[in-house]
Image (cartoon, rainbow, N blue to C red):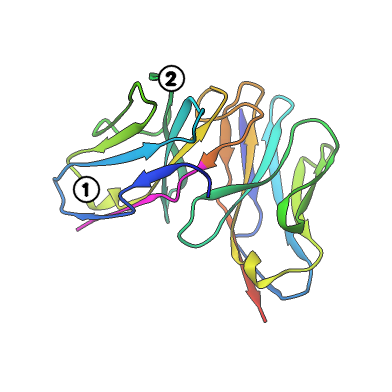
Amino acid sequence: AQSVTQLDSHVSVSEGTPVLLRCNYSSSYSPSLFWYVQHPNKGLQLLLKYTSAATLVKGINGFEAEFKKSETSFHLTKPSAHMSDAAEYFCVVGNSWGKLQFGAGTQVVVTP
Amino acid sequence: DSGVTQTPKHLITATGQRVTLRCSPRSGDLSVYWYQQSLDQGLQFLIQYYNGEERAKGNILERFSAQQFPDLHSELNLSSLELGDSALYFCASSVTPGTSGGAGTGELFFGEGSRLTVL
């Protein structure tokens, strides 16, 4: 069985400050982990993915995530938020034969 | 642009009616997935097709059905519509078949969705 928990439903940050979106997962197997972003009225887009290579994964738009097996976490960070980062972010866990479980999402608001 | 095309973008209909949502996957992608996104349920996997064959079913109601055609486009049919069916319906595609709504270690490419409003 696998599950994913996004610890914050809403995150508000000021432009230029760091962003931290928290994700914990549970998986009986070595998981694949993904972060997707959904901008208003758009489909989901892959930000980054972890598939048992380097534990620190760099994605698009300056985002990165670190896989911590001991903490079963895959938190998403960005050093400096931009107004265009306002969106909903989904943490996703997948198992070795491809079943995906989406988190409930974290809505990010960026204030000037 | 993900390369996945969904039509229509918006649809308003009445309870009891039937609608068809259409999806054209990215060129070369053999797998098509359908998801439903609503405020109360979040993103729910409905069904997956791979090269014309149903591969996995998720939380799809019996009133809903889908198919994938030889040209790989897919249609999601929603019948006897209820108010609670109002949602954003996404189609996604991937190269690899995966199972149960996933794409293995690959990536899903999502369309921009079809917003269904049932009045």
**Mark 1 burial class by Cα count in 10 Å: few <14, some 14-19, many 20+:** some
Disc 1 target residue: B82
The part of the image, by quadrant, that contains residue A69 is top right
Q: Residue at x 57, y 33 (%)?
A: A100
The part of the image, by quadrant, that contains residue B45 is top left
Amino acid at dot 2:
Asn
Q: Which mark is residue A54?
A: none
Q: Magenta span has A104?
A: no
What's the magenta region? B110-119
Query: Which quarter of the figure is the C terminus of chain A placed in?
Result: bottom right
Which secondary structure dominates the residues rendered in magenta? strand
Residue A6 lies, in percent from the top left, at 64, 51
Disc 2 target residue: B51
Left or right side of B76 for A111 = right
Residue B89 lies, in percent from the top left, at 38, 46
Q: Chain of mark 1?
A: B
Q: Residue at x 77, y 40 (%)?
A: A72
**Mark 2 burial class by Cα count in 10 Å: few <14, some 14-19, many 20+:** some
